[in-house]
Amino acid sequence: MFVQSIAPMKELLKDIIETSRDRIKTPITGSFITAFTIYNWRPLLYLIFSNATIEKKIEHINATYCDFWAIVIPLFIAFVYIGLVPYVMVLVEYCTKKAIEGRKTHKNTQILFDLNIEKHIASEEFQIEKIKTGHKEIAELNRTIDTLSSQIDTINNQNKISNDNYESLIENSNANEGKLQNIISDLNNDNLSIKAKFSRFITLSGLEDLIIMKKDEKEYFLEYCDFTFFKKQSTHWYSDELTDKYLKLELIAEITKKEYILLPLGSRFYEYLIEEKMDNPI
């Protein structure tokens, strides 16, 4: 309860201090305090530095200094200060305006004069340094010219060598182009021959009717063989209709009920599909 009662008191004191601080900052308050202190300096000094008891001090101040004018005169001085001082300051600034402008003009003139002297000195020093370094710059320029001339000669020689190499490459390229055309012609002839042999092989092997099957049917046959004959896992469920289709195509044969073997035609077709899959991966 004690702690809870202290918190509101602290807030109240804080508000009072903030309010008093804002009021003291106002012109009338500050002026009044200053005038009151100056006018009532004797009772204040007596109150602070006297060795008498506080009761004696209060009695002496009430009897000697506390009257109507102790408050009115400082208040009057504060109002006069607030009302007249701004006009006095304006008058002082008006009277000293010419003097202030003259001082600033004279100061700026002096600064410009000093800057012109420094500029002239810097220009003369630059001319002197330019004369001193003139011969050095000419010698350096001649060395630079010689270096650049040497670099140009080197670049010209390199360009000549590059042109000779380029002409040689063109001649070799023309010769190689003829050889390349002959090689391409030979490859085309070999390719035609291989295609004819492969077509003949398909015709003789009895696969001509099978390789025109749809892609998904070929993939189903591969997975069917892997699952049925090579005991590999499969993600599809194979129906009896699919089995009957492979029986009719003479790819498989039934040896007992629900037991099948892969016929030679089916084996060749399976190997063909494996090679096709390796040549054309997905």
Image (spheres, rainbow, N blue to C red):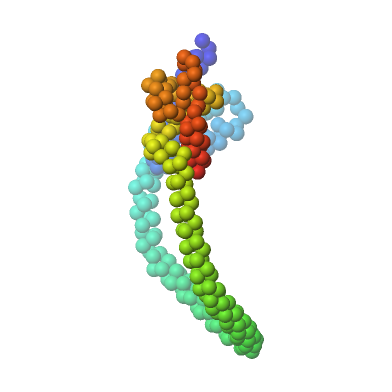
Residue found 50% across the figure and 70% down from its top: 178
Q: Is residue 48 left or right of residue 219?
A: right
Q: Which residue extends farthest front?
A: 204
Q: Pinpoint residue 172: horizontal percent, then vertical percent.
A: 55, 73
Q: Is residue 242 above or below residue 162?
A: above
Residue found 40% across the figure and 42% down from its top: 27
Residue found 56% across the figure and 77% down from its top: 168
Q: Pinpoint residue 102: horizontal percent, then vertical percent.
A: 42, 71
Q: Is residue 99 above or below residue 134?
A: above
Q: Pinpoint residue 232: horizontal percent, then vertical percent.
A: 54, 25
Q: Is residue 137 left or right of residue 98?
A: right
Query: Which quadrant of the figure has residue 249?
Result: top left
Q: Pinpoint residue 170: horizontal percent, then vertical percent.
A: 52, 75
Q: Which residue extends farthest top?
A: 1
Q: Is residue 59 above or below residue 49?
A: above
Of residues 62 and 187, the one drawn nearer to the viewer in this rendering: 187
